[in-house]
Amino acid sequence: MKDEQIHRSPKIVEYWETQQLPRMHKTSQEFRNALVCLYTPESLNTLFQEPFLSPEEIERKQFLRIRQLVKLAYNNIPLYRNKYQEVGFEPGDLKSWEDCHCLPVVTKDELIEAFPDLCVNPNFEISDLFPTRSSDSTCKT
């Protein structure tokens, strides 16, 4: 956002003051804090001021987010780091959408086999996480 002061319309202030975070099933405090950071009055204000972005801006923001996720996976998830290193890929190598083709595919079986030690961010407590069920034919968790 530009250097201008954020305008807080009464509609946004009213919206924000009436919101409560959803009750979550045994979720870590770190995750709750992340949710609070995502939905600040400033982020809502930006959304209301510019609800429509150009396709180029959407693509730019999507690519920046992909880069963040790849870096997060590389730095915190051993399974991903090992797969990336096997093909000689480092997060800094991701400079364009075309570079995404260099990323190795992680299969469901690899994730199942790696759980929990190699595929869960060590910053999270396993007891704070909850299992999911698959609806596909394998019925693997």
Image: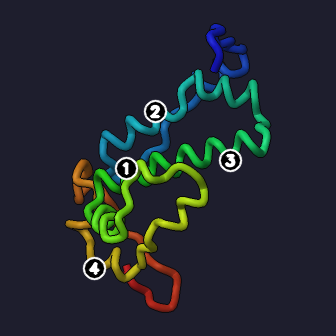
Q: Which mark is residue 13?
A: none
**Kind of residue at disc 3:** Glu
Q: Which mark is residue 59?
A: 3
Q: Quadrant of residue 113?
A: bottom left
Mark 3 vs 1, N-terminal side = 3
Which residue is pictured at 60% across the width and 60% down the height?
A: 98
Q: Secondary structure at mark 4?
A: helix
Q: Which mark is residue 72?
A: 1
Q: Which mark is residue 36?
A: 2
Question: Residue 83's spot in the image, x, y percent?
Answer: 33, 69
Circle 3 Cα neighbour tier, 10 Å, few/some/many (<14 / 14–19 / ≥20) = few
Are the residues flagged by discs 2 and 4 in contact, CB closer than 8 Å?
Answer: no
Structural distance between the alpha carbons of marks 2 and 4: 33 Å
Structural distance between the alpha carbons of marks 2 and 3: 25 Å
Colour logic:
rainbow
Placement of the N terminus among the 4 image quadrants: top right
Can you identify the residue that label 4 sits on?
113
Mark 4 vs 1, N-terminal side = 1
In the image: residue 102, left or right of residue 119: right
Which residue is pictured at 30% across the width and 61% down the height?
A: 81
Name above or below for residue 109 compared with residue 39: below
Mark 2 vs 3, N-terminal side = 2
Q: Quadrant of residue 86?
A: bottom left
Q: Is residue 119 visible?
A: no
Which residue is pictured at 69% across the width and 31% down the height?
A: 47
Are the residues flagged by discs 3 and 4 in contact, CB closer than 8 Å?
Answer: no
